[in-house]
Image: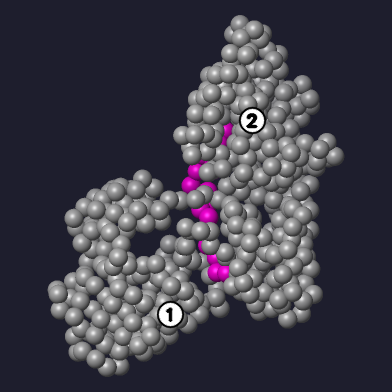
Amino acid sequence: MKRIISLMLSLTMAGSLLSGCGSKPPAEGGSGTQSADKLSVVTTIFPEYDWVRQIMGDQADSAELTMLLDNGVDLHSYQPTADDIIKISDCDLFVYVGGESDAWVDDALKEATNKNMKVIDLLDVLKDTVKTEEAMPGMQAEEGHNHGYSHFADSDVQDRSLSDWDGDWQSVYPYLQDGVLDEVMERKAETGDKTAEEYRDYYETGYKTDVSQITIDGENNTMCFVTNGVAAKAVYSYKGYQIYDYKSGSRGARYFFEATGGDAAAPKYVQFSDHGIAPGKAEHFHIYCGNDGFEALSQEMDHWPTYYPAGMSGDEIKEDMLEHEEKEYDEHVWLSLKNAKVLCSAISDALQELDPDHKDAYAANTKTYLDELAELDREYQTVVDGAARKTVLFGDRFPFRYLVDDYGLNYYAAFAGCSAESEASFETVSFLAKKVDELALPCVLTIEGKDHKIAQTIVQNTKQKDQKVLTMDSMQATTSDDVKNGVTYLSVMEKDLAVLKQALN
């Protein structure tokens, strides 16, 4: 798909440049802007556009400012028009989010006619503070994205039966040894803190096992372990679970089973971890086995033999692991006032370099605006500190991860922030409705838009059925008409604070 977009952009630019051969060239020594005496700034979304306006102040009226997504088109579904590409090609400053939704930008910038333009990628500015999309209990999984949970409440964890691990399974250890998983180690090294060889050594310890195959019969509660070609089978009884809080800040759960009869060579105690915390078929799992009791197994953190379905080839296992290594970044960085301060400073620096004649004015405007952002940030913290609750629940997509993390709030939602899903399953609706009851939440929240059917369905499945459905604005549908009517980034964040206050009290 990316190659197709690249080709389309190249053809668009070629045609546009040919049709514009008679246009007025930039002034000698100029930057190549659309108008030689005007600063040209192109932004993708409303928050960026408003930040530029606030920093430029009076000078904004004499500049050419463009907001590409000015007709309510969502960031995640936007594709640039030919006119959009031309505006980007010739501008002095281009500001964009930089996530997967902006995959088209790299190709557009390759066609830029103004080689001196400054480009601000919001995610690049924020660097290591950018968060990845996170799966939460009850959240509808996108097709092809069935990830485990790294954050959850103790009450989210449910008992499971051996049937969740039913089937024939193979160890991945041989594929590590023969080099099939080398590409996985290289991918880990690209984003991790170890070299590929160091990761290989780490997983050599983690995956190492003599048990090549495990067959699990959930209906009869049996497990058969094949060790060095010899099979040992036993009947197992479920003994509950334990929740773990890891040093990394994430959480996990292990499920315990104890042998009650069968071959003496089969392990007496078994723990499963598949990143799940509720009933559901495992796609792969880590297993901890031994004869010295559950407490001994619970101390094991460095050795976790891993198993995939026996029918998968080594290459298929490698591809699955590589898919899990792909990080989908949460693009909604503008919904953090703390992030906004960092991003506005970066925009101000760029504008001051591009327009030194007004540098002092931009600096003064920036200071004033950063103070306003800081004051609203303090107001958010005050509301949260005095709130009766610390959890919000969205019957919708959830783009507010940065905001809730800023103030230590918990959340549940029907979909992740960048999800393309629009229909919630019965299980998702039921889980969220039970959470509303369990936490006595007064509201079910949504984001902007006309269709709040999922939130209303959640309310109808609660015991009281009288919770309010309130909307928080993620600024993904703000239009140029809204701007003309006085909408600003701060005004939207203030309204969101008012809604959040209702949801927490």
Q: Residue at x 79, y 25 (%)?
A: 61
Q: Is residue 316 above or below residue 71?
A: below
Q: Which one is earlier in the sequence, the residue at label 2 or at label 1?
A: 2
Q: Position of residue 237 (x, y in %)?
A: 36, 89
> Label 1 sits on what residue type?
Gln
Q: Residue at x 41, y 56 (%)?
A: 324
Q: Position of residue 17 (x, y in %)?
A: 59, 16
User: What residue is disc 1 on?
Assistant: 242
Q: Are circles 2 and 1 on residues that touch, CB within 8 Å?
A: no
Q: Is residue 353 visible?
A: no
Q: Quadrant of residue 292?
A: bottom left
Which of the pair 55/39 is nearer the observer?
A: 39
Q: Position of residue 283 (x, y in %)?
A: 39, 67
Q: Is residue 92 above or below residue 454?
A: above
Q: Position of residue 70 (x, y in %)?
A: 73, 37
Residue 388 among magenta residues: no
Q: Is residue 409 left or right of residue 388?
A: left
Q: Nearer the viewer, mark 2 or mark 1?
A: 2
Q: Which mark is residue 81?
A: 2
Q: Which mark is residue 370?
A: none
What SS does tag 1 mark?
A: strand
Q: Is residue 481 visible?
A: yes
> Label 2 sits on what residue type?
Thr
In the image, the segment drawn in magenta is 120-138
Q: Residue at x 14, y 75 (%)?
A: 229
Which of the pair 263/369 is nearer the observer?
A: 263
Residue 121 among magenta residues: yes
Q: Residue at x 76, y 30 (%)?
A: 57
Which of the pair 7/76 is nearer the observer?
A: 7
Q: Quadrant of the C terminus?
A: bottom right
